[in-house]
Image (cartoon, rainbow, N blue to C red):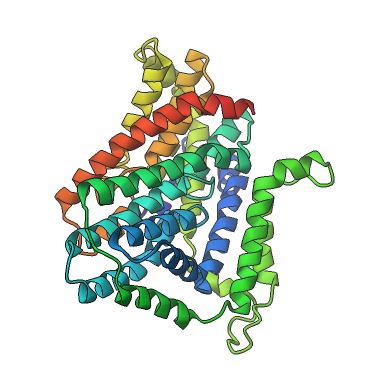
Amino acid sequence: MPMPAVALIPIVLFPLMGIAGIKETTAKYADSVIFLFMGGFMIGLAIEKWNLHKRIALTIVNITGTSGNRIILGFILATGLLSMWLSNTATTMMMYPIAASVIFVVKENNKSGNVANFALGIMLAIAYASNFGGISTIIGTPPNVAFVSFIREKYNYTIPFSRWMFICTPLAFLLLFSLYFVMVKWLYPNRIKSDLATHEHIKHELKQLGPLSSAERRVLIIFICTASLWIFKDLINELKWVQLDDTMIAIIGALALFLCPSGENNIPSSKYVLEWSDTTKMAWGILLLFGGGIALASALEKAGLIALLGKWIAGFSGSDPLVLVFMIALVSIFISEVMSNIAQVLVFSPVIAGIADALHMNPIMLGLPMCLGASCASMMPMGTPPNAIVFASGHIQMKQMMRTGFVMNIICVILITLFCWLLVPVLLRA
């Protein structure tokens, strides 16, 4: 069965088996965190609809330069920044055709350097940068939303959007720059020098887009306003003029897209920046998946199974909390190579919370490395959708992805462990 269809099973089985009533079960499918992600999806749709993502990516590559290393750096930065706000799958799908056209131009015009390494590097870069960039914000990747939802339900504590960014954005950039070093300085040096043809191709693509259109400008303004509200929400709430919530802000941004005229009179079918018909492209199945996961986690918690399992695992955790954080990050990353990262976070969040409660530790200290690790699978094509997309390009062999992915997995485990252990307690107290 498709995963979204599986997510509907609790609606049938829970009432039949006496686990929970139909109203209690279906209420989980309308959890506020689902609407947070829906708003983020809609903003991403508008960015994609008006080609704003392509302009951002090409502009960054144009700035960073056109040597092999600089092009890869440009794609890493552009992909990572886009993935902060769009789903990692959508970001990879957007960047893939741009990367393919750049590879073609470099192959046609470059007579020196290792073009095969360049093609391999740029494809792996957009997949891994999509994964790493997504950990920066709550809406960047589904596991983040699932974890934040669980913490709110279990502990009645909402991790603020700005606090998540404050903790995870520096880590994401460390991972992005580690990726650049591993790809171009260590495993796959390309030694391709800057050439005029590639530079002209990038400029031509930008020129083809033309000046910033009215619709692009309006999407950009709404996007910046929404992101600013997420970042400065706590400061606004302290003024006591209004009380904003991350979900409210996401829906405000989405509604603004439907209310704002596009300004493109030559496109009658798009009178507004976003039309309801555009939402047919939205990943509605992911929203159902969240609902099913929240319903299942609630039932497991209610039955007491999670507390028992947490206490049992805690008995084998040893006395060193640092080792425990390391082991959670390690296990999470390697399990996510063969398991859906959303399902992984939904299943393991209650277990990790049980361990934290048994050891009297902050659950975020143990839960965050589990959640972040679930988004960093790099070895296998089935690890994350971005991995599968770029693997299908034909530029990557399985042994190359496994070799690169293993190195990145180890770097991720070390950085996530150190970051969570040293900085998260300080930042949570800030």
| Residue 283 position in % (x across, y down) | 47, 60
| Residue 387 position in % (x across, y down) | 30, 53
Q: Would residue 245 be visible to someone looking at this image?
A: no
Quadrant of the frame with the C terminus:
top right
Q: Is residue 325 above or below residue 400?
A: above
- The furthest residue to the bottom: 266
- Residue at 59%, 46% (x, y): give it: 33
- The furthest residue to the top: 319
| Residue 215 position by quadrant | bottom right
Left or right relative to 393: residue 289: right
| Residue 295 position in % (x across, y down) | 51, 40
- Residue at 22%, 53% (x, y): give it: 189
Q: Is residue 91 above or below residue 384?
A: below
- Residue at 41%, 80% (x, y): give it: 204
| Residue 74 position by quadrant | bottom left
| Residue 53 position in % (x across, y down) | 48, 67
How many numbered callouts? 0
215 vs 259, nearest the viewer:
215
Left or right relative to 345: residue 255: right
Q: Would residue 316 be visible to someone looking at this image?
A: yes
- Residue at 51%, 18% (x, y): give it: 361
Q: Is residue 99 above or below residue 239?
A: below
